[in-house]
Image (cartoon, rainbow, N blue to C red):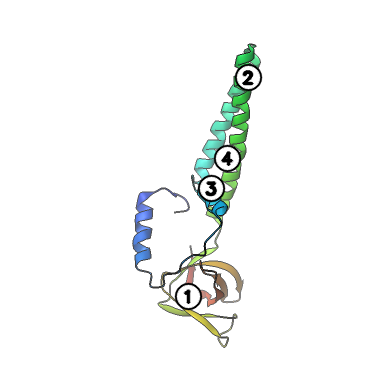
C-alpha cells in the first residue's frame, strides 16, 4: 500500500485482512493538522511526486522563456506569476517526494505473526507481562535489543516482544 496508496485491490484486501484481526486497537486521536499533512503526503507515491516536480520544473522554464521573449507587460505579469506558482509547486512536490520516500523506505512497521504473544515491560523473559496481542496486529517498531523488539501500538501502549513473534513489513 505504501507503493500504490490509491490501488483499490490493495485497499480491499487490507480491509479483509483487518476484519480477521482479533484485537481491535483504536488509534489515539491526532491533531487535525497532522491528519491534513498525512493526507497531503499520501496523495501520491514517491514516483508520482517526482513526476509532479519534473512537470512543474518544465512549466517554470516555459514561463521563464515566455517572460523573456514577450515584452508586453500583461504577458510578463502572467509569465512571472506562472513561474512563481510553478516554483511553489516544485517546493511542495519536493517536500512530498522526500516525506513519501521516507515512509516507503522505512522498516518501522511490523505485524504480529504468533497466534498469541505477551508484551513484556523489558527485553527479558522474566519481566512483567503488560498485555497480550494476537495474530495480525500492526505495530510500530521503536528499538531493538538482541532478540527483542520494542513496539508501540496505535493507542500509545509500549512494550517489548520477542523478534520471532513479528515480521517487518
Please say if the residues under marks 2 and 3 sit with CB atoms less than 8 Å apart.
no
Image quadrant of residue 160? bottom right
User: Badge 2, how many Cα within 10 Å: few under 14, some, many 20+?
Assistant: few
Question: Which SS class for mark 2?
Answer: helix
Q: On the image, numbered disc 3 is attached to which residue?
A: 41
User: Badge 3, how many Cα within 10 Å: few under 14, some, many 20+?
Assistant: many
- Judge depth for marks 1 and 3 and give the one in front: 3
Where residue 149 is drawn, which disc sits there? none
- Judge depth for marks 4 and 1 and give the one in front: 4
Where residue 165 is drawn, which disc sits there? 1
For this orientation, the residue located farthest to the bottom is: 126
Seen at 60% across and 41% down, the residue is 94
Please say if the residues under marks 4 and 1 sit with CB atoms less than 8 Å apart.
no
Q: On the image, numbered disc 4 is attached to which residue?
A: 93
Q: Where is residue 124 in the image (x, y as percent from the top left)?
A: 58, 83
Q: Quadrant location of the N terminus?
A: bottom left
Earlier-in-chain disc, 1 versus 2: 2
- Marks 4/2: CA distance? 24 Å
Instruction: Using the image as rendered, state which of residue 124 and residue 155 is in the foreground.
Output: 155
Where residue 77 is drawn, which disc sits there? 2
User: Badge 4, how many Cα within 10 Å: few under 14, some, many 20+?
Assistant: many
Amino acid at each position: 500500500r505504501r507503493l500504490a496508496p490509491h490501488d483499490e485491490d490493495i485497499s480491499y484486501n487490507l480491509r479483509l485482512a483487518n476484519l480477521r484481526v482479533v484485537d481491535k486497537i483504536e488509534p489515539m486521536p491526532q491533531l487535525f493538522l497532522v491528519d491534513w499533512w498525512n493526507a497531503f503526503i499520501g496523495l501520491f507515491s514517491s514516483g508520482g511526486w517526482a513526476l509532479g516536480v519534473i512537470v512543474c520544473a518544465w512549466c517554470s522554464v516555459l514561463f521563464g522563456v515566455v517572460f523573456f521573449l514577450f515584452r508586453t507587460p500583461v504577458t510578463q505579469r502572467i509569465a512571472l506569476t506562472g513561474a512563481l506558482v510553478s516554483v511553489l509547486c516544485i517546493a511542495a512536490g519536493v517536500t512530498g517526494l522526500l516525506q513519501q520516500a521516507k515512509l516507503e523506505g522505512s522498516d518501522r512497521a511490523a505485524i504480529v505473526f504468533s497466534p498469541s504473544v505477551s508484551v513484556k515491560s523489558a527485553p527479558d523473559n522474566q519481566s512483567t507481562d503488560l498485555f497480550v496481542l494476537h495474530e495480525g496486529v500492526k505495530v510500530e517498531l521503536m528499538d531493538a535489543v538482541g532478540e527483542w523488539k520494542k513496539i508501540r501500538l496505535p493507542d500509545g501502549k509500549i512494550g517489548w516482544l520477542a523478534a520471532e513473534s513479528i515480521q517487518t513489513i
